[in-house]
Image (cartoon, grey):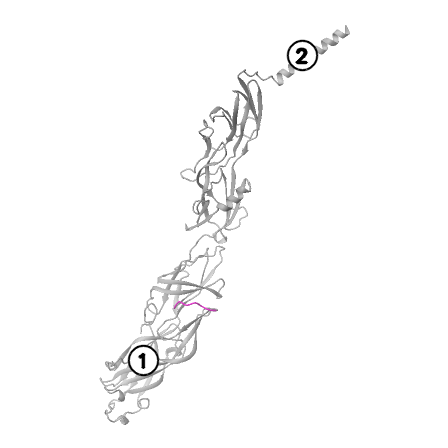
Amino acid sequence: MRRNGLSALYMFSLLLVCAACGKDDPEPPVPAPDKGTLRVSVERTGDTPLTALAYKEDGSLAFRKDEPAGTSTWSWQEQVPEGKYDLWITGTRSAKVTLHDTEDRAKAYASTGRVEGDSLLASVEAPLYMEGVAGVKVVNGEEVSLTSSPKDIRRILRLTIDAGKGFGGVKVAGRLTGIASSIRLSDRIAAGTASLGLDFLPVATGAPGVYQAVAGILGIVSMEGADRGNILTLSLETASAERFSYQENLTARLAEAINADKDTLDLRLEVSPAVPIRLYTGIQTRAAVDVFDQTPVSIAVATSSGQYTDHWDGIATNGEITLDPERYYPTDGSALFLRSYHPAAPHVNGEVHYDLTGQEDLMMTDEQSGSLSKRFDATLTPLVHKHLLTQLSFKLLIANAPDSYRVRGVTLNGLATSAKVSLSEGKVIPVGDPTSVGIYVDPGTGGIPLVNGVADVPGFILVQPEATFTIDLILAVDDNPSNDLVFKDIPVKFEGGGGESGNAYRVEISLELPDDPDVPDDDTEDEIPGPMDKYKVAIKATVIPWNTGNNGSADL
C-alpha cells in the first residue's frame, strides 16, 4: 500500500514536469520530409526596424521577413527546401536610406538620399545595420540555428578645420567628392559616387576660426586622377557677404584612415582661405590729383610698424594697385603694415637708393595697416602717394629789356646726384657731391624771346628738398654769342626759408636793367660791363600748384 502511494506521487510529479516542459519550451514542428528548418535569432539593435533577406544558391530571393521596430527580441524559423542559403540582416531608422533590387543577391544594394533641393549627398544620421552569413546549409528533415548580431556599417567622418582667428564668426559650408552613394549588400562594396554636403559649426571650445562637421557616410570611392579623388571644397562667407574659397585633396589622408580600419575618420586641417589684398591709391598734389596709368610701384611690407622686411611689386592704374603676383592676408588675423613708393625698386634694410637727374619724381605714401578683420579700404586706408622731391619751374623777368634780348641758357647748381629714401621716416637723404643740370640750353634757334620783358622757361625740374641752389643765366643781347651776358651762381631764395618736400615752386629770375642799356658793338667786347656788377639780379622761389608730368615723372 505504501509502495503504491509512492508510485502515484512519482507519476503525478512527472506529469507536472512534462506539462511545464510543454508550456515553456514547445517542441518545434517536425520538418516536412522535403524541407529543413532554418531557425534565426537576431540580437536587437534598439528600435531599428530590421529586414531579413535569404537567397538561394542561384542568387534569387528565397524569402524576406520584416520586423518593425519596438520588439525586444526577434527570433523566427522558416522551413525551406534543402540547399545552401545566404542570409542578410539589415535595417536603419534613416528615411534617407532605402533598399533596392532585393530580388537578386548580386544586385541588391542600399543607397542614401540627397539634401533636399540639392544634388549633394545627405549625411546618414542613423545607424545602418548589416550582417551577412553565406553558405548556410539546410538538410531536409533537419534544423539549423543561426544567431545574428548586425553592426553599424557606416563610417563617421569628423572633419575639423582651422581657418585662423581672422575667420572667426564666418559661415562655412563644404563639399567632399568621392563619397559612396550606395553599397552592395553582398560584399559591402561602394556602387556609386557623389559629393557629400558638409555643414560646419564652430567648435565647442569657442576657438575663433575653428569649425567642425560630422557626417555619416557609406564609404569612400577610390578614383584615379588628381582631380577625381576626395576633393574638399570650402566656402566661407563673412557677415558682409564676402565669399572666399579653399580646396584640398584629402584622398591620401582618408585612405590612410580607412586602411587603419577606423570607424571614425577623424581629420584636422589647417586651411588658408585665399583672401586677396586689394590696395587703393592716388597722388597728392596742390592741384588736381594725378592719375596713375599702368605705373609700376613698389610696396614695402612689414609685420610691425616701420620694420619693413619684404617687398611686393604692383601696377598702379587709376585708383587701384594690382599686385603681381597676387598677395593674401595672413590667415591668423595679424596685421600687415604697408608703404607704397615710386619709382619701383627693391629696398635694402629699409632704404631705397635712386640716381637723381632732375627728371624723375620720387613718391611715397604714409604707412597703412590692414588685416582680415580690417582690410585695406579706398576711403579709410588708401595709399596716397606724396611727392618727396621739390619741383622747380622757371620764369625770367627783365625790366627795361630791349626786344632783342633772349634767354640762351639756364643752369641749376646744387642737384644731388643720388639719394636714399628712408622708408621708416619717409625722407630723402642726399648722397654724393652735388652737380649742375641744364634747365634750358639754346637748341640753335637763338634762345627764348622776351615778351614785354617776360620769358617762361619750358619744363620743370625735380630736386632734393631743403637744399641750397644757385642759378647760372645766359642772356643774349644780340645775335653774337660773344656778347652774351653771363650771370653766375645767383642764389635761390625760397619762400618760407627752404624748398620743402612735396612743394612746387616758381623760380622767378628778376633783372633790372638801366633805362637805356648799352648795346655793345660786335667788335668791342671790352665795352660789355660785368653783368653781376652792373645789373640788379634777384631770384625768388614762390609756392605754386604742382605741375603734372607723365604719371608723376617730370617731362623735360
Q: Quadrant of residue 388?
A: bottom left
Q: Earlier in the sequence, mark 2 or mark 1?
A: 2
Q: Residue furthest left?
A: 403
Q: Secondary structure at mark 2?
A: helix
The total of numbered circles placed on residues is 2
In front: 387, or 326?
A: 326
| Picture quarter with the N terminus | top right
Percent position of residue 452, x then y: 23, 81
Residue extent of the magenta highlight: 343-348
Q: Residue furthest right?
A: 2
Crowdedness of circle 2 by 10 Å Cα count: few (<14), some, many (20+)?
few
Percent position of residue 29, x then y: 57, 16
In front: 419, or 448?
A: 419
Return the mark for residue 508: 1
Q: Which residue is mark 2?
A: 15
Percent position of residue 319, x then y: 35, 61
Q: Is residue 347 magenta?
A: yes
Q: Is residue 320 left or right of residue 258?
A: left
Q: Is residue 534 above or below residue 344?
A: below
